Each structure stands twice: as C-alpha cells, then as structure tokens.
Image (cartoon, rainbow, N blue to C red):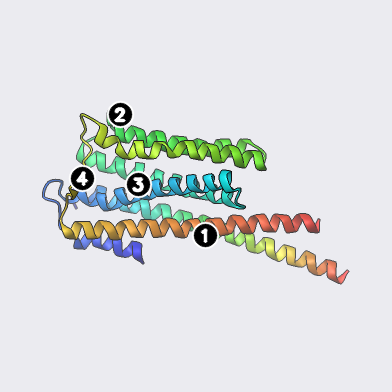
Amino acid sequence: MTTSEKYVTAAYLVVFAAVLVYVLIIATKLARLQRDVAELARLVKERLDG
Amino acid sequence: MLVCAAFALAFFYVPTDADQGFSQRIFYLHVPVALTAYACFGWGAWKALLHLWKRREGADLESYVAIHIGVIFGILTLATGSIWARISWGKWWVWSEKQLVLFLVLFLFYSAYFMLRFSIEPGPQRANLCAVYALFGVVLIPVSFLAIRLAQNFIHPVVFTRDGPQMAASQFATFCVCLAAMLALAATLYMVELTGKRLDEQLRELRELLA
C-alpha cells in the first residue's frame, strides 16, 4: 500500500468513524428516552391507581 | 446503502486521475462533505429566517439542529481537506490559502453559535438572538464558496468552472452519487436528531405536569 493510498483510506475511515460515533451517541440518547418514557408511564400508572 | 455505494464507486469504479493519482479519490469525499456542510448552514439560516419572519413554531429548534449537523460536516471537511493537503502539498494546513481560512472562519463562526445558545436561558430571547446570529453566518457561505475564484494566487484546485465540470463523465457521475449520499446522510441525521430533541421537550413538559 502506497503512502497516498494510506492517506485516502484514512480520510474515508475518518468519515466512517465519525458517523459510527454519531450513531452510537444517538443510540445512547434513544436508550435514555426509552428509560424516561418508562418512568413517566410508571408515574401515570401510580397516579391512576392511587 | 447509498453511502456504501458511493464509497465503492469512489474506490473501485472511478478511474485514477492522471494528474493527482490515487489521492484524487479524496475529492469524492471532501467536496460532497463540504457542500453538505454549506447546505446544512444554509438550511439552518432559512429556518432562522422563518423563525424571525413567520414566527413558525419549532423553527428555532430546526435551525439549531441543522447548524449542529453542519458543524459535524464542517469538522469532517477540515479533517479530509487536511489529509488531502498533506498528500498533495506536503502540509496539513496552508494559511495563505483564502478558501481554507474562510472555511475555517465559517466553521468557527458556527461553532461559536453553541456558546451563544448555551449562555442564554431558554426562551424567546435566546431563539431570536440565535436566529439573528445564524442569519449573519449565512453571508459567509457565498464568500467562502467563491473565495477560490476571487483569489489571485491559489493552489486549491478548481473543478467546477463556467464551462461545466472539468472531469470525465464517470468521475462526474461518481461525484453526484457521493454528493447525494452525503446529503441523504445529513438529512437522516437531521431528522433523527430533531425527533430526539422534540421527544426530549415533550417528555420534559410531561414530567413537569406530573410533578
């Protein structure tokens, strides 16, 4: 692999890695939102039962 | 899938450039990413205008998310551009290049948007100030875009001239696919981020109601 090929591959990997990191951040946010929804659902259920 | 197809075309389909060799393949990544960053900033400014002009509900959040995605694409533009500069010019950054410096100014301007946004309490004042700031930034986009044509001495390559794209049909087709892929990626990230933020707001309101 030439130096030029290494740099080009690195550039594409940088973008790929950035998108991957962003997707992971979104996945973490989604998991937090799911927890929040579950917590709110529990609170509503408690209010209705009580 | 479109991104994977675009990367595959850039690596395996498009012919190697006679002048720059293999390194020219960064063009199919760097330019679409840069144009997508411009598009995001432009979209953010349009939403800011809608907020100030029509007082459209949610336009402030849409403007913020568009600028957020634009800054991410801005980082990628600077990173891929630096790698390309290292191969072609032997340097990671050239301060004498007007287009590079103007893009950096544009990127820093929109990065400062977040400092402004998070230094003010949420409310109409923050939304108005952020919208005005986003509109000021949009002026830099055509300046940055045209800088290469205004510059007298430049080493940054010009591909799109008044006579059309200066490349082979296969290269132009690959470029179009790459641009479509980056725009689609940005649009997807924009929608996902926006949905997440809206859900966050709705949940906060619900929590306050239940408290």
In the shown orientation, is residue B143 left or right of residue B24? right
Measured as percent of width and height from the top left, residue A9 is found at: 27, 53
What residue did someone put label 3 on?
A: B34
What residue did someone put label 1 on?
A: B192
What residue do we see at 61% from left, 42% from top? B127
- Graded by Cα atoms within 10 Å as few (under 14), some (14 to 19) or many (20 or more), the crowding at tag 4 reads few
In the shown orientation, is residue A3 left or right of residue B74? left
What residue do we see at 19% from left, 63% from top? B13
Can you tell which mark lies on residue B162? 4
**Which of the chains bears the disc numbered 4?**
B
Q: Which kind of residue does numbered mark 4 sit on?
A: Arg
Q: Secondary structure at mark 4?
A: loop
Calculate the distance from the C-alpha at mark 4 to the C-alpha at mark 3.
Answer: 20 Å
Q: Nearer the viewer, residue B116 or B10?
A: B116
Quarter that holds the C terminus of chain B: bottom right
In this rendering, the label closer to the viewer, 4 or 1: 4
Calculate the distance from the C-alpha at mark 2 to the C-alpha at mark 1.
Answer: 36 Å
Residues flagged by tags 2 and 4 on a common chain: yes
Q: Which kind of residue does numbered mark 2 sit on?
A: Trp
